[in-house]
Image: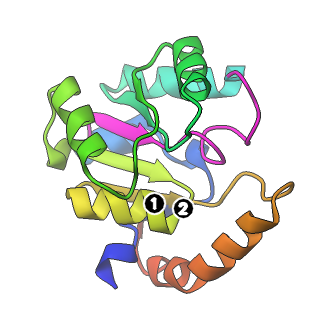
């Protein structure tokens, strides 16, 4: 059960500040793209997301997209527009992409966290890789009935995570 429990909880990414991450020793924040940083289908980052990235950078935290999106262009275009590194088709919850990102950025597991909206990919993958996990609520479920089912199956694990800390 511990593998499915997030270390920290937040309603959305904007509740997580660079100062809070820095205070806990994090230097790398891996982030899921779709429904965590932006709604599905939104092609480019907005000004609010850019300002959040800037806050992270100001506190020595690098934002890095770790996306399972199978279309190579989706995470590449979004990451290039946000001027941050990325790994697309990451294969979460498998761990190689987590290790590759940490190696690429020269950080340890203790200096790394992942933020995402899904228990069975982001939280499970992060826990398997030995990094802190931050679970956020999905930005938007509309448009795909499968998402409703997936989040319904995750509900018990989200409740377990409520006993976790806030960041």
Q: Quadrant of residue 46?
A: top right
Using the rendered image of the protein, determine whether residue 128 is visible from the camera's viewpoint. yes
Q: Are marks 1 and 2 in contact (CB under 8 Å)?
A: yes
In this picture, residue 13 sits left or right of residue 43: left
**Which residue has dot 1 on it?**
121
Residue in the picture at 81% in, 66% down? 145
Element at label 2: loop
Q: Position of residue 133 (x, y in %)?
A: 37, 58
Q: Position of residue 22 (x, y in %)?
A: 29, 38
**Which residue has dot 2 on it?**
118
Using the rendered image of the protein, determine whether residue 167 is visible from the camera's viewpoint. no
Does the magenta-highlighted stretch encompass residue 28?
yes
Does the magenta-highlighted stretch encompass residue 165?
no
In this picture, residue 99 sits left or right of residue 80: left
In the figure, 10 relative to 87: above or below?
A: below
Q: Position of residue 60 (x, y in %)?
A: 30, 25
In the figure, 106 relative to 77: above or below?
A: below
């Amino acid at each position: 059960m511990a593998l499915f429990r997030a270390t920290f909880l937040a309603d959305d990414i904007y509740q997580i500040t660079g100062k809070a991450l820095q205070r806990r020793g994090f230097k790398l924040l891996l982030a899921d793209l779709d429904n965590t940083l932006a709604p599905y289908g939104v092609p480019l980052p907005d000004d609010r997301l850019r300002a959040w990235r800037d806050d992270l950078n100001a506190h020595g935290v690098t934002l890095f997209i770790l996306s399972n999106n199978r279309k190579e262009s989706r995470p590449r275009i979004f990451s290039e527009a946000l001027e941050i590194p990325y790994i697309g088709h990451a294969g979460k919850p498998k761990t190689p992409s987590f290790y590759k990102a940490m190696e690429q950025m020269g950080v340890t597991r203790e200096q790394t966290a992942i933020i995402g909206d899904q228990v069975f990919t982001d939280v499970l993958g992060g826990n398997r890789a030995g990094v802190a996990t931050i679970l956020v609520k999905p930005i938007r479920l509309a448009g795909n009935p499968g998402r409703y089912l997936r989040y319904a199956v995750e509900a018990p694990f989200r409740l377990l995570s409520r006993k976790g800390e806030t960041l």
